[in-house]
Image (cartoon, rainbow, N blue to C red):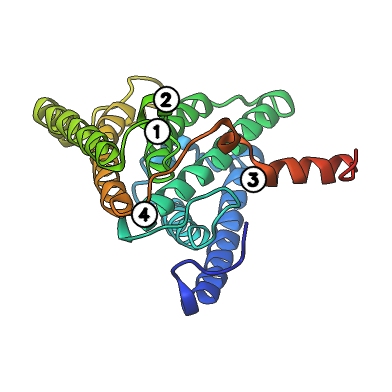
Amino acid sequence: METQSLWLGALRRPMRVLMIVLVAALVLVALWLAIGSLFLGSGIDMSAILRPGDNVLVKLMLWLLLAASLVASVYLSDTKGAIEIAPTGPMDILSLILSRLAMIAIVVIVGVMFYEVVARYLFAKPTLWANELSLWLAGFVFLLAGLYSMQQRSHIRIYTIYDMMPRWGQKAADTITVVLIWAFFIALLWGGYDEVRDKLLRMETFGTAWDPPIPSTIKAGILVIIGLVALQALSNLIADWNKAAELHTAADEIDEHEIANLKKALGADDNG
């Protein structure tokens, strides 16, 4: 990624230092809990982490996890990938922060699976929570990927007819699309709000041995993130309103930066 600041400016370096400190502290606390669970018989498992009660160390780890994830997401959102669209407003920045949070969640899922393999096959101590935690995180990754795709204008679009339209026709098509997205969100909010509220009030759980609140949190996540997608679609419409018409071709899908990196990794020169 590029190192030039997008929106943090002078806060970029302090945010980086804070991220490193929080992540280091989180890793140390998590390792201590894992060692205690595997070797010292501390009795602190994922059930205790989900419902920490009065356990100070578990509460500390959860707060560190929240703080480290948020700070890392903010810091990472301040850089732009080679093929990413730069943010044009506050909604774009929020979408980028949440997209970075989803990227971190993918790393966490990989770590959870690695821990499960090690615990199961090296120490004969399989977990009851690894699969469910992965499903829980993957649900939010899926939802946030939709928000990121909307911000990057990388969702599925068919340009065959769109490119043939005059600019006013393209604007009309874009407006109709945003209206339909908002109609879907309003219908979702109208039909699902009561159910989401009830599930959150009773914190409905998954009904398994670990019993995480997957149904209540995912239902709420669907409502909130679809709302953010609708806001992002409106933000895109406003930001793109005065842009000149663009002609889309198959070449738009070619990632020259990625091709160059692959050539470099394979040791191929420009004539290869």
User: Toward the viewer: 201 or 231?
Assistant: 231
Q: Quadrant of residue 79?
A: bottom right
In this view, the mark in front (1 or 3): 1
Q: Under tag 2, what secondary structure?
A: helix
In this figure, which residue is indicated by the disc labeled 4?
92
Dot 3 lies on which element? helix
Amino acid residing under circle 2? Thr
Q: Which mark is residue 163?
A: 1
Residue tagged by mark 2?
Answer: 160
- Please tell me which residue is depicted at 60% across the width and 45% down the height of the picture: 36
Under mark 3, the amino acid is Ile
Image vertical order of residue 70 relative to residue 173, above or below: below
Inspect this view and state whether residue 202 appears: no
Question: In the rendered structure, which disc, 2 or 3, sits on the residue that comes first in sequence?
Answer: 3
Q: CA distance from mark 4 to mark 3?
A: 41 Å
Q: CA distance from mark 2 to mark 3?
A: 58 Å
Circle nearer the N terminus (4, 3): 3
Q: Amino acid at mark 1?
A: Asp
Residue 7 visible in image: yes
